[in-house]
Image (cartoon, grey):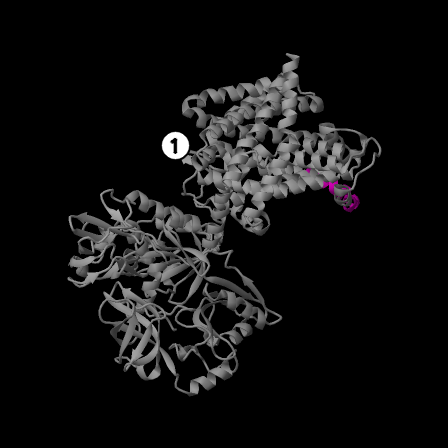
């Protein structure tokens, strides 16, 4: 399993790609594997204000439903509509084409609690 | 020089003295507790694993469980089992045997732990060979590389001595004394025999060991048993002596000098440890080569080592010595054993022991070679591997003719010193042992004979009502599609398989199930229900009819804990119930092209099997399998029921089969099994219904044959049949793509009207489907309902089952 070094992570298995005041969010390869085949992604509405830790999306797989939380506070600026017709993108390319939503970060809100790839890997070892 | 020799002797006394022995036993006790007394609780499981029930030929590793244990036992069972026991009794009296048992019992936990760790921290070299053992768990588990090196160094040194020189010397000596064979002859012969095997590496060593070890054990056991049968009347007395003098001192009798309880204990414990080597760290090197992914499983195998070595083999020696009475005569060591067998069986007894001893020595030399070889590899890599083989072989020859007392002592010290780093490793990693053990038994409550296969194929394993089974291999959707379009292979071995036999088998099963069996013929299968007295459904089952005196039931894994006691409770005196769940495997081959995959392996008659019939066949003309044509996925398919131990073979053969156009058979997990059965509208016992539901509520009323005058639950069912069910198990589809899960509420006309039991995205259909218990007023097909999932309500509609129906194959339906 791969966890790119240029991304940040959460203990709830989201990844975050920071780009200025924008943060793109998806699920890690670990989560994608645990979920098994994704059949439906419940995307949030663009423009929705969210708090860090708030549930924003739900990924339904054949076996289970799993909540996706906002890693940081902000406004939903974009969602990956490609997932509507092809939810399997989340399994096939979880870090690229399988991204879920993008936040425009609230200015000045603290960017706390995010993990580096190394730290995230450690939390996984704890889970096993 | 003399001073040096004395120093060596003293050091040897120290490393094998009471403090280290206390440390070894103490660690064993600690590990017994940290593993929850694994040696008592999982003893039976260990036996089953050795039998090969869980072996998979393709899994990583060099040798099978059984071969790994044989290699370890080859090295372990040695002169200690014959000579050591004699010494313990000669000095400590019969009570010493009791203390040997205690060491073995405690040592089982130690052995379990170090072999578990050896597997967990083993490595594979670029050429694919496996190395493991205390040096690796010290380095990789505790980060103590220096201690790892110390251990390896001691192992190399010890191997040359107690694994080689001492062994060949005692063999040559013994053969000279018993058969007057010159030492020179033994020297050359033994060196050649050893060389031939070790050249071939672990695989040949394990191969030879797995042949010789059982043979030598059987041979020695037989010799002992003959003596014991001749002295059978003295066995109770001998056992009495063992127990009595474990705790009470024994005064001098005959030539026996008498001993204190402390001396008895010390002799028993020390000789016990010498014999089973628990805690020294040698056996884990052999077990690390085992083909398994589960360290716990190999630990359980290793655990049987001290049992076989000490509790079986040493006890036999001890009983021979005690029942023949020679222990009172002031003899010691090899002479005592030889005398005991002489007394028991005459000159042939003595010769028998000599031959056993020779075999014990030979296997010890090849077993220890492997230990030394791996330790050297750890220290220097493959560089000196060939030189070491030559050195080993020549030392066998040298050892037979020369007595190198100081070298022996040095080796003995090295052997004792192996224990120190190893005990550091064991204590330091006892948390890992404890956690791995707990996790394993948490995860793996019951396994099917295919567990090794699932692991090898990379199946993602999950717990299914206590069974450890694959959830998926390549992916649920892919597996699902494969079954709809080509074929998939499932492990269904967790289904309970029960034989009902006897004079009254027919009337018993008639009493048990709601359907009438009288329309069945030999080779027919019936899908029916078992209900309780209130008409509640205990389980849905398949009844296979062999004859009126032999039925075979396949019931659900989930409910077998209830069903089997239920059968026992209602059993007729003239019927036997035999649970063959563990003895048989069960593979389900499902899909439109399933029939083609069986083509190369079965006689053609299977193709003529009608739906819901079976026949006894042979797979590849050698494995007996029961072949039936039923299924759960909604596709055509077969079940193959082979003996448990042959299941992996059948699975591997089928899954390596390509059809003429190159299409492979796809291994499938529980995930696909569930989506497939739901599309086909098949129910899952324990989830879609249980004892609280009657057959009419779940749409299976047609299975209840009231024309049958009596069966369990009939009166209640007759009453229930007369009125409209309050709720019905209904099929529904959902608009939108949310997926309802078991337990989600159902609403009809805005009010709560029921509960979802199964829900899934239907891969073949492309929308969401499910089953729910719904108030009868909302259960008619076409009724609009709402289902709440994740706090939101989604609109759905009640529909009729099945959601999916295959097109072809109606021609196969027979008279049923």
Label 1 crowd (10 A; few <14 / some 14-19 / many >=20): few
Compared with B119, B381 (above or below) is above
Q: Nearer the viewer, residue B205 or B548?
A: B205
The residue shown at (52%, 81%) is B710
The answer to whether residue B385 of the structure is visible from this angle is yes
In magenta stretch: residue B653: no
Quadrant assignment, res B605: bottom left
Compared with B162, B279 (above or below) is below
Compared with B604, B120 (above or below) is above
- The quadrant in which the N terminus of chain B is found is top right
Q: Which residue is mark 1?
A: B125
The answer to whether residue B347 of the structure is visible from this angle is no
Quadrant assignment, res B407: top right
Q: Position of residue B706 (x, y in %)?
A: 46, 83
Left or right: B635 as drawn, with respect to B382: left
Q: Position of residue B682 (x, y in %)?
A: 36, 69
Span of residues in magenta = B222-238
Q: Nearer the viewer, residue B253 or A104?
A: A104
In magenta stretch: residue B225: yes
Residue farthest front in this picture: A108
């Amino acid at each position: 399993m791969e966890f790119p070094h240029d991304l940040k992570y959460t203990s709830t298995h989201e990844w975050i790609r920071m780009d200025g005041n924008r943060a793109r969010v998806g699920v890690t390869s670990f989560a994608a594997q645990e979920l098994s085949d994704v059949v439906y992604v419940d995307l949030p509405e663009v423009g929705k204000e969210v708090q860090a830790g708030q549930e924003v999306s739900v990924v339904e797989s054949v076996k289970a439903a799993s909540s996706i939380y906002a890693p940081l506070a902000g406004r939903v600026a974009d969602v990956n509509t490609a997932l509507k017709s092809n939810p399997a993108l989340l399994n096939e390319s979880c870090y690229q084409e399988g991204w879920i939503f993008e936040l425009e970060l609230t200015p000045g809100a603290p960017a706390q609690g995010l993990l580096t790839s190394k730290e995230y890997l450690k939390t996984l070892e704890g889970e096993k | 020089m003399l001073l040096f020799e004395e120093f060596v002797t003293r050091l040897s006394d120290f490393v094998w003295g009471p403090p280290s022995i206390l440390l070894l036993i103490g660690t064993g006790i600690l590990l017994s507790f940290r593993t929850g007394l694994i040696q008592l609780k999982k003893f039976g499981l260990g036996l089953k694993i050795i039998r090969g029930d869980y072996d998979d030929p393709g899994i990583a590793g060099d040798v099978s469980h059984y071969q790994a244990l044989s290699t370890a036992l080859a090295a372990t069972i040695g002169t200690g089992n014959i000579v050591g026991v004699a010494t313990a009794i000669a000095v400590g009296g019969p009570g010493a045997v009791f203390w040997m048992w205690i060491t073995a019992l405690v040592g089982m936990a130690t052995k379990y732990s170090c072999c578990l760790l050896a597997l967990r921290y083993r490595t594979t070299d670029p050429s694919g060979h496996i190395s493991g053992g205390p040096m690796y768990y010290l380095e990789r588990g505790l980060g103590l590389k220096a201690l790892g090196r110390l251990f390896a160094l001691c192992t190399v040194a010890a191997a040359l001595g107690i694994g080689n020189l001492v062994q060949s010397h005692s063999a040559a000596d013994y053969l000279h004394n018993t058969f007057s064979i010159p030492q020179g002859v033994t020297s050359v012969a033994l060196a050649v025999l050893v060389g031939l095997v070790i050249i071939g590496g672990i695989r040949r060593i394990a191969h030879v060991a797995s042949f010789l070890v059982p043979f030598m054990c059987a041979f020695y056991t037989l010799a002992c048993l003959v003596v014991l049968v001749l002295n059978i009347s003295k066995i109770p007395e001998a056992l009495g002596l063992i127990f009595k003098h474990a705790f009470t001192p024994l005064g001098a009798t005959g030539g026996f000098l008498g001993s204190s309880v402390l001396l008895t204990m010390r002799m028993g414990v020390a000789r016990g440890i010498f014999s089973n080597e628990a805690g020294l760290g040698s056996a884990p090197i052999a077990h690390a080569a085992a083909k398994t992914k589960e360290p716990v499983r190999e630990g359980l195998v290793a655990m049987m080592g001290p049992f076989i070595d000490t509790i079986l083999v040493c006890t036999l020696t001890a009983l021979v010595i005690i029942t023949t009475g020679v222990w009172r005569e002031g003899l010691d060591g090899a002479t005592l054993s030889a005398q005991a067998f002489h007394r028991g069986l005459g000159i042939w007894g003595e010769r028998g022991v000599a031959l056993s001893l020779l075999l014990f020595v030979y296997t010890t030399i090849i077993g220890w070679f492997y230990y030394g070889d791996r330790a050297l590899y750890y220290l220097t890599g493959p560089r000196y591997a060939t030189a070491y083989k030559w050195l080993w072989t020549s030392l066998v020859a040298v050892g037979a003719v020369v007595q190198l007392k100081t070298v022996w002592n040095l080796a003995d010290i090295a052997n004792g010193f192996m224990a120190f780093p190893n005990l550091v490793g064991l204590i330091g990693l006892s948390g890992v042992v404890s956690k791995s053990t707990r996790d394993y038994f948490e995860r793996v409550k019951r396994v099917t004979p295919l567990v090794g296969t699932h692991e090898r194929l990379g199946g993602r394993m999950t717990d299914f009502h206590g069974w450890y089974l694959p959830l998926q291999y390549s992916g649920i959707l892919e597996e699902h599609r494969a079954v709809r379009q080509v074929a998939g292979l499932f492990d269904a071995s967790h289904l309970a398989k029960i034989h009902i036999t006897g004079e009254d088998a027919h009337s018993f099963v008639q009493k048990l199930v709601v359907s009438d069996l009288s329309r069945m013929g030999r080779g027919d299968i019936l899908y029916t229900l078992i209900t309780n007295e209130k008409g509640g459904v205990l389980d849905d089952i398949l009844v296979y009819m062999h004859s009126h005196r032999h039925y075979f039931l396949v019931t659900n894994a989930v409910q077998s804990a209830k069903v089997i006691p239920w059968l026992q409770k209602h059993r007729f005196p003239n019927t036997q119930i035999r649970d063959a769940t563990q003895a048989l495997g069960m593979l389900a081959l499902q899909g439109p092209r399933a029939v083609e995959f069986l083509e190369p392996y079965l006689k053609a008659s299977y193709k003529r099997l009608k739906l819901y019939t079976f026949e006894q066949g042979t797979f590849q003309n050698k494995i007996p399998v029961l072949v039936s044509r039923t299924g759960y996925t909604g596709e055509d398919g077969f079940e193959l029921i082979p003996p448990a131990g042959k299941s992996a073979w059948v699975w591997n053969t089928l899954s390596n089969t390509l059809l003429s156009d190159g299409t492979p058979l796809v291994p499938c997990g529980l995930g696909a099994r569930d989506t497939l059965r739901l599309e086909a509208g098949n129910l899952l016992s324990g989830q879609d219904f249980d004892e609280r539901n009657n057959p009419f509520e779940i749409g299976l009323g047609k299975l209840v044959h009231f024309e049958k005058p009596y069966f369990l639950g009939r009166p209640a069912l007759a009453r229930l049949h007369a009125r409209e069910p309050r709720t019905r198990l209904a099929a529904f589809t959902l608009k939108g793509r949310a997926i309802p899960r078991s337990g989600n509420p159902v609403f009809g006309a805005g009010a709560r009207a029921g509960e979802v039991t199964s829900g899934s995205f239907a891969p073949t259909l492309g929308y969401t489907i499910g089953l729910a218990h719904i108030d009868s007023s909302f259960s008619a097909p076409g009724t609009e309902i709402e289902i709440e999932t994740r706090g939101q309500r989604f609109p759905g509609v009640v529909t009729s089952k099945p959601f999916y129906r295959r097109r072809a194959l109606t021609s196969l339906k027979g008279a049923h």
